[in-house]
Image (tube, rainbow, N blue to C red):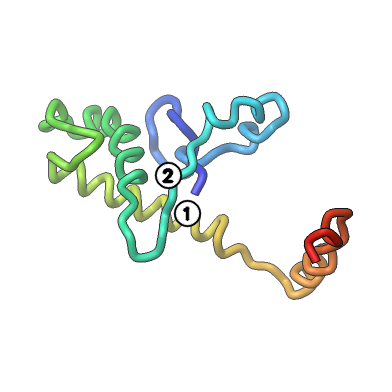
Amino acid sequence: MVIGVSPSGEIEDVSELLPTESMYTDENYLNIDHLTETISVQNYRISEQLFEYLRSTLSGHYAELIGTDSEYLMVTCPRVIAFEEMVIEWAIKLLQKVGKDELFKRRSVDQDEAEIATLGNDENSDKIR
C-alpha cells in the first residue's frame, strides 16, 4: 500500500493519508520517495509498519483532540489505550478505503480482454519465451 508522507494540517479523513494525483506528476516523480511511503500489508497479519506510521501521524491529532496522557505516546509501541483505539479505528478506515478504491476496482470483461491482448506485444516478450 502506498501512502502519503506527512499530511499537512489537521487530519480529518483517511483520504488525507493517501497520495494525491499531484504527487505523481513529472516534477514530483524524482522526489516520490520523499512524498510517499510503501507499507507492506498482508492478509491475516498485523502490519507494525502501518501502526507505527499511524501512531506518528496521529499523535499530534490525538494531543489536540483528547490530550490526556499525550506525553506518554510512543510510535514504536502501544502505551495509551485511548490512543491505540483511535489508531486501530483509523487503520480499519484506511484499509477499507484502499480496498474499495484500489484493490477491488470494478472492471468489465472487455477491459480485462483488452489488457490481456496487449500482453506479450513488446520487443522483449520474444526473449522471455
Left or right: residue 10 compared with residue 118: left
Determine the secondary structure under disc 1. Answer: helix
Q: How crowded is mark 1: few (under 14 residues within 10 Å), some or many (20 or more)?
A: some
Indicate which disc residue 18 carries: none
Q: Mark 1 points at which residue?
A: 97
Left or right: residue 13 compared with residue 69: right
Where 92 falls versus 22 (above or below)?
A: below
Q: How many labels does the image show?
A: 2
Judge by depth and name the residue closer to the eye, 115 or 21. 115
Q: Name the residue under label 2.
A: 14
Quarter-of-image position of residue 17: top left
Look at 33% across and 40% down and name the residue there: 54
- Badge 2 vs badge 1, beta-carbon distance below 8 Å: yes
- Gap in angstroms between the C-alphas marked 2 and 1: 8 Å
Q: In the image as oriented, which residue stretches furthest toward the bottom?
A: 109
Q: Position of residue 7 (x, y in %)?
A: 45, 30
- Which of the two labelled residues, at mark 2 and mark 1, occupies the earlier sequence position? 2
Where 114 falls versus 46 (above or below)?
A: below
Determine the secondary structure under disc 2. Answer: helix
Judge by depth and name the residue closer to the eye, 80 or 31. 31
Q: Position of residue 67 (x, y in %)?
A: 16, 30
Look at 36% across and 45% down and name the residue there: 50
**Which residue type does callout 2 highlight?**
Val
Look at 48% across and 37% down and name the residue there: 37
Q: Position of residue 123 (x, y in %)?
A: 88, 54
Look at 11% across and 31% down and name the residue there: 69
Q: Position of residue 34 (x, y in %)?
A: 52, 27
Q: Residues within 10 Å of mark 2 (few under 14, many from 20)?
A: some
**Which residue type does callout 1 highlight?**
Lys
